[in-house]
Amino acid sequence: MIRAGYDMRHITLKLMREDLPRASLVLAELEAFAPDERPLLESELPEIPGSTFRARIRRAWGHLDRLVGLLGELPSDDSDTPLLVLRREQLVEIDQWLTDAWQQCAPCDEALHRIEDEFRDLNQLEKSLEDFADLDVDLSRLQAQHEHLDMRIGTLPTANLSRLSDILQLSDHLILNVAGDGDTRRVLIAGKREDAAILDSVLHAAAYQPLAIPESFDDNPSALRGELQARRQKLDQDCQQLRGRLANWSSTNRRQLLRARQMLEAAEPYVSVRGAARTRGPLAAMQGWIPASRLAEVEQKLTDDLSLPFLLESRAPRAAERHLVPVPVRKRGLLEPFALLVQQYGVPRFGEFDPTLLFAITFAAMFGMMFGDIGHGAVIVVAGVLLRRRLRAFTYLFVLAGASAMLFGWLYGSIFGVEHWLHPLWIAPMSDPIYMLTVALAWGVAFLTLGSAIAISNRLLSGDQAGALFGPGGLFSLILYLALLGGLVSFVRGNGFPLLATIMIVVTLLLLIAYQWQSSDAPYGERIFTTLIETFEIVNGYVASSLSFLRVAAFSLNHVALSLAVFTLANSMETIGHWITLILGNLFVIVLEGIIVAIQTLRLEYYEGFSRYFYGDGTPFKPLRVGRPQTTLTR
Amino acid sequence: MNRLAGQAYLRTRLAIMTANLLGHEKLNELAGLPLDELAANTGFAEIASNNEAGRLPAFERALMQTWLDELSALLRPLEGPARRLLTQWASRYELLNIKALVRGKIGQLPNEEIERSLFELPGFLSLNHDELLNTDSVPELLRHLQKTRYERLATQALRQYEERPDPFLLDATLDQQFYSDLSNRAQQLSGHDRTETLDLIGRIVDRHNLVWSLRYRFNYGLQASEVLYLAIDGGRVLNRALLQQMLQAETLDEAIRTLPANLLSHGDMPKQITLIEAAMRGDLFAHAERAMRRSPSALTSVLSYLVLRYGEITTLYAIVHARVHGMSDDLLHEAIDPLQETAA
């Protein structure tokens, strides 16, 4: 359909509180219901149920997540066991079991982290000893407690090194050596023993960590290697032991873990409805949005699954809530890449003109006009087909853009930049640049007029009548634009500026000024200023946007000019050089100019098209689902 | 929006928003009102909550939301380093949340209680607090934080915590990173924007360094070198040499005597840390007021406005908080204007 989300209905499900979790689960299994959390029923049903339930579920998930992080992913549940509603006492039991389970496993987690840290320190120590081997410092002092000298070897975050170095200099300490890269540096620090306390405090603030020098450091290198190796083996053994214990625990408790996950997932829909469900005593209601086509199915499933009576009411969205209605994202087939590009800009509002089809047509047309060449277009088509596995849905965009380039190449009579092999069906761009610019301008005017007409219709559908009449791209600014344009065309043709056009310009200008004036409540000076600026902006916007379309002609001329440059360069070379230049030159034209033209076309679509008529602030339809919504720690 | 239009937008927006500032006198006047009148004047009366205990946090969140909405409006025409600078300034709330989370975990508070002290932040700032809350210990919390953009800080804090758990050290490290990032972002600006914002940030850093260095040295008894390490670079007057000179003093009086005269624009430096904090704050706000109205850099005017507004919002919240908890008039006035009370 050309209008987005045309068949959505608002539903209110009135039921007994006892059936609320079951109803949430039924709706989630159907994936046809998006909760509406507006407090529409607040006065009759003041309570939002399940806050303690939610907190407990969240804690239970927290423990389960940590267990999974430690023990490894659980297998996905492929059993046909029907999902059961999680009762409060079951949740308490699962939460308690998960808390106990984590308490049993947490010491292993801590121990594994410690082992990891010790491995890291061991690596740093080995590197440090290598770093400092050639240093003219008696490192045996690092072990011995010298009477006057205080030497330390350790690591610290790279970001703290410069600050630490400056501060240590002020307190007569020295960083004798720095090694390592990345986030951690290994340092050797020397100072007076009497200032050890000062050094301790600064090093603590700098997150310095001392490295423990092995006993055998002073003896001989092979003993040292042996000791480090022994440490490493011990850590490996400890690690394996811990992993083994965890694996045993996991295999013993796997069934219980899977059950916990399944129960928590089944409870998730009830948790997710939040403010969309309301209660008062034993009564409850849930509200949200459902596609009209799924309404009967939903009602049937509720009838089958709910044990107590219920009432399902549905209605069409009201005018005032159109911007809140979620819009289902549909599979678009050949138009999929264009739908994805539209989504980059925004989601259409409910009932708003869905620009995908128009976007696909105008994109292909403008790309072809700017890049008209049978050969180059064919290369794009072939490239699209060959790369279809990588391009996926965007294959269609390549094929359509290439085909359009071929069509216009035929109209321009251009094959790989050669303009004399084929007689142009329409015109060779370089033969009459002024004509090409005029055509581009006319295309722009048509594009902007269509955009404004869609904008007016969208605003009317959204109930924004003032915007439809007086706003930028509204009816009066469109009349003003067309009158100005018609007058200018007549004037340029020597017929003078028509009276009708003058009257239309004056009347629409006055209307626009009056509207701007009354919609501002600023002091007089500021009001005059903003009214003039806003009105000028509307007129200027149309003029600038129209001129923006001259690039369509400019790029068609540019394409010919670039090809000419390639031929001129190739003709100045010998046979091999000639062909190499021709091939590379054509590749250069296809890749570089192809990318630029695609960007320019997108720019025209987004800025001169979408920004004019497309609200793009719709809400995608996200139905309630069984299982947990994905969350990440970072934004 | 081009640069010129952006500047015009900012100036116009700012001219309108300036009317939101209450000023010192109005704040004092509010502090003198009984609770019901104060509630009607500040919007606290419109805050509905299921329980009385939830009203104050809800009010604080509403105030913060106002500040963030204004920030969002001012961010609109900005891009590049200027935008990054203001976004960094907004991330102070995220910093407060991290501090609250760590303190809550150290104090082994229940998650619900920790959660109540967290700000609900907009998407462009907010960490996922659920995962951070659902941890059983500080090291576990810090390990989760290592997965975020605070990785460097969390790694450092984890090392420090394992060696010796000092909550103030984490606070100081967080502040250090916050202001260093702020200064770095200001360094990337050019022309008036750069010099004027660096001057304003330098004053903020001076205030922070002076007050906290004195506290660490003379209240907490930290070593001078450690305090110097925790100080933030980028002060306007207080460079590292001056701070070192101050920290080598044996007493607070002696330390104050080492301070340069131009640290305060008017008057002498008080002799108590709380009064020093108030004097430096007053001095900063006076400068911000001037910069907001007269700075040749629109960005500095905006930052000055945000500094002033943030200061007023925290004072306003403090007044309502004090009144709700039945603080006496004298104590309240002393808390919001200690210098005035001391002079009286």
Image (tube, rainbow, N blue to C red):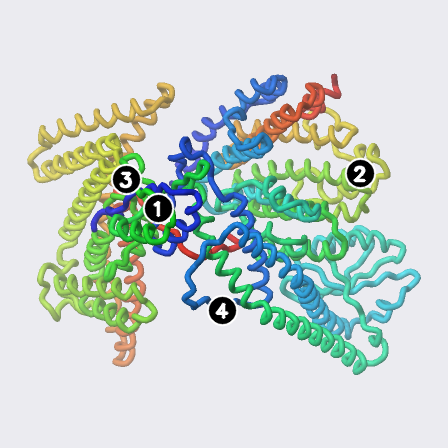
Q: Give the residue type at disc 4.
A: Pro
- For the residues bearing labels 1 and 2, Cβ distance under 8 angstroms: no
Mark 2–mark 3 Cα distance, whole angstroms, equals 64 Å
- Badge 4 local density, few (<14 within 10 Å), some, or many (20+)? few
Q: Which residue is mark 2?
A: B219
Residues at discs 4 and 3 both on one chain = yes
- Compared across the picture, whether B339 is left or right of A6 comes to right
Which chain contains the residue that carries disc 3? A
Q: Give the residue type at disc 3.
A: Pro
- Compared across the picture, whether A398 is left or right of B331 comes to left
Q: Nearer the viewer, mark 4 or mark 2?
A: 4
Mark 4–mark 2 Cα distance, whole angstroms, equals 56 Å
Q: Give the residue type at disc 1.
A: Thr
Kindly state the secondary structure of the residue where label 1 is placed.
strand
Image quadrant assignment for residue A424: bottom left
Question: Residue A434, how many percent across, how many down?
Answer: 15, 51
Q: Nearer the viewer, mark 4 or mark 3?
A: 4
Relative to A145, does residue A199 appear above or below in the rendering?
above
Question: Residue B193, how many percent across, how many down?
Answer: 52, 39
Q: Residue at x 56, y 54 (%)?
A: A60
Q: Which mark is residue A619?
A: 1
Whichever of callouts 4 and 3 sits on the residue coming sooner in the sequence is 4
Mark 3–mark 1 Cα distance, whole angstroms, equals 14 Å
- Badge 1 local density, few (<14 within 10 Å), some, or many (20+)? some
A322 or B92: which is nearer to us? A322
Image quadrant assignment for residue A576: bottom left
Q: Give the residue type at disc 2.
A: Asn
Q: Which residue is mark 3?
A: A317
Q: Which residue is mark 4?
A: A75
A126 or A55: which is nearer to us? A55
- Badge 2 local density, few (<14 within 10 Å), some, or many (20+)? few
Mark 4–mark 3 Cα distance, whole angstroms, equals 42 Å
